[in-house]
Amino acid sequence: MDDAARRQDNHLLVVLSNPPTTSGVRTLQRVEQAREMLGFTSVAVANLFGIPTYRTGGITAAGTEPPGWLSARTDLGDAIRQANAVVLAYGCQEPAGSARAHFRDQLVWLHRMIDDHELTTWMVDGRPRHPSRWHRHTYALHPHLTFAEALPLVLLRTVAIANNPPSAMSRS
């Protein structure tokens, strides 16, 4: 079955870092706001890394070996094949230590998949900021606007390049 036949109509994918250990309600609310703002009829989330941690920084310890990264590729690949577009929102801070190399390999793989499936890509001001940080970012730039008014000003279309994925070097 080709990609066009597998894709849902008007379906957005939001790529996050890893599964939460909490409900993730705030993140999912922001994901829903992005879906509405961009005009998609449905949305799904998928993660770069398959092991839950309390905070994204926990990936430094949990992501030292390949299994958590490689297992995420199955769900992430399926989600990409079903999507019409993608929001990159996995966060702006790379894990440290040996997890960093796995993280970078995962980004190269992700961006090749995005390129191969010719998906339109969005990020918040050109960085893969996590949805839990979007409000802080919009308020810093547009303190006189509500979040709903400011989000369209920062959630911008971008170009995903397989050989040069967006940097995730500093905090958002």
Image (spheres, rainbow, N blue to C red):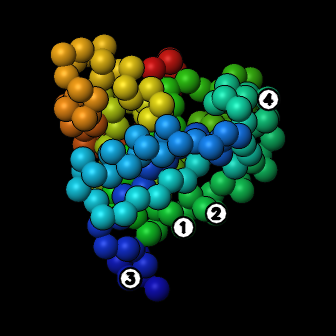
The residue shown at (74%, 45%) is 51
> Secondary structure beneath disc 2?
helix
CA distance separating discs 3 and 2: 19 Å
Identity of the amino acid at label 3?
Ala
Query: Which residue bears the numbered disc 4?
Result: 61
The residue shown at (33%, 45%) is 33
Q: As displayed, is residue 80 above or below residue 91? A: below
Q: As displayed, is residue 89 above or below residue 43? A: above
Q: Earlier in the sequence, mark 4 or mark 2?
A: 4
- Residue 53: in sight, yes or no? yes
> Secondary structure beneath disc 1?
helix
Would you say 96 lies left or right of 152 here?
right
The residue shown at (81%, 41%) is 65
Q: Earlier in the sequence, mark 1 or mark 4?
A: 4
Query: Which residue bears the numbered disc 1?
Result: 78
Identity of the amino acid at label 1?
Asp
CA distance separating discs 2 and 1: 6 Å
> Is the C terminus in the top left, top right, bottom left or bottom right quadrant?
top left
CA distance separating discs 1 and 3: 13 Å
Identity of the amino acid at label 4?
Ala
Mark 4 in CB contact with mark 2 (< 8 angstroms) = no
Mark 3 in CB contact with mark 4 (< 8 angstroms) = no
Circle on res. 74: 2
CA distance separating discs 3 and 4: 39 Å
